[in-house]
Amino acid sequence: MPPIWFLISFVPGVYLSYRILRTLFALIWAITLYKIIPIFYGTALQKYKSRWTVVSGGTDGIGKAYMFELAKNGLKKFIIVGRNEKKLAIVKKELEDDYDCQVMTYLFDFFDGDFKELRQYLSDKNIGFVVNSVGVGRKYLERYGDRPEADYQMLKVNGLGSAEFMSCVLPPMEKNGGGQMVVLSSTQGIRPIPLLAAYSSTKSLISFLCECIDREYKTINVQCLMPALVATNMTYYNKGSLFVVTPEQFAKEALRTLGLSKCTSGCFNHELQCLLRHFFPWALLKHMMMPIYWKQQQRMLKLHGEDGAIRPDIDPVDLNGNSDAKKASPNGTSCIPRKISRASVLEDNRSRA
């Protein structure tokens, strides 16, 4: 029997080696996927050129950027589903003028819209490509239940609404020979994230659903994109940085991974951030991450103020949470203001869908 000191040193050494190796392999794969393969491999989209591409959440952020990247790469027929009529008209004109695309729009609210009507509208379309990027964000990071109306709205739009949209496009896709679906999830759906409970839960739901659909339908390929922070209206960042990429940068890199990976963060910068979860066990990492979310909580409080209104004198990208998080929550409880009415919460969040 080996001496006890050998066992004490051997077991941790093996575990540490395992963590280092899995992180190293993840790094090698990230470099291969985002830096090496694109040199030799081009995404094949020609087979979808004569068929419709349906996009949810295509008037802003990642959905819009991804759709324009598809147009740059030759796709010419788009159906954009969204709730803002003015934005739909603007994006439609841009696609028609800049890329000579054929564009149809469908006005639809994923919070209280009639999915039977949407299903009927899409049933006779020859759909070959789908981008599902519908989603809403929140002004504050707060505990689940502190603002139940906002929790409900997020669960319904990001969870049920997004899932229902996929069920609407699957039958016409399968009927016409299958196709490709790209779904926006989030790295915050990989593990439970406190202060973002509703958002994290819906993204976990969508990620699981993507894998199930991909395995259930032989002729439909599903790619799940799980980015970290992207500079969109939802995150209240208006420009990119080392850790926050622009929608255009994200869309360009993400499209290159189509056909190569079923589930990926979508861009090299975010893939590097994900190396942390390969190296550190979740039991440790979940505590290491909390200061980041506390700082983000402070950033949102500074940005919106206690009355929930965005302060025009503060640039969102400068709010990096320099103040002490304990000032906001001295007792470990939420101090998020609750002066916002139900109507204002829903309208503000839904305007970002």
Image (spheres, rainbow, N blue to C red):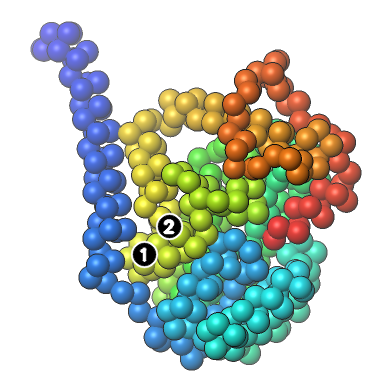
Residue that extends furthest to the front in the rendered view of this protein: 313
Residue at coordinates 50% horizontally, 25% vertically from top-left? 287
Q: In the rendering, at what x and y percent does residue 276 appear? A: 38, 36
Q: In the rendering, at what x and y percent does residue 200 appear? A: 59, 44
Q: Nearer the viewer, residue 59 or 152?
A: 59
Instruction: Tell me, yes or no, if residue 121 can be seen here.
Output: yes
Left or right side of 3 for 234: right
Residue at coordinates 49% horizontally, 79% vertically from top-left? 71
Inspect the image, locate mark 1, and give the three-letter code of the amino acid beneath it: Thr
Location of residue 160 by image quarter? bottom right
Q: Nearer the viewer, residue 327 or 30?
A: 327
Residue 278 vs 210, above or below: the answer is above
Left or right side of 5 for 201: right
Q: Residues within 10 Å of mark 1 (few under 14, many from 20)?
A: many
Q: Residues within 10 Å of mark 2 (few under 14, many from 20)?
A: many
Numbered label attached to residue 350: none
Inspect the image, locate mark 2, and give the three-letter code of the amino acid beneath it: Gly
Q: Quadrant of the N terminus?
A: top left
Left or right side of 256 for 204: right
Residue at coordinates 48% horizontally, 72% vertically from top-left? 69
Cα distance, mark 1 to mark 2? 7 Å
Which one is earlier in the sequence, the residue at label 1 or at label 2?
1
Secondary element at tag 2: loop
Secondary element at tag 1: loop
Labelled pair 1, 2 in contact (Cβ < 8 Å): yes
Numbered label attached to residue 266: 2
Task: Report the residue marked by disc 1.
Answer: 257
Residue 36 vs 337, above or below: the answer is below
Residue at coordinates 72% horizontally, 33% vertically from top-left? 301
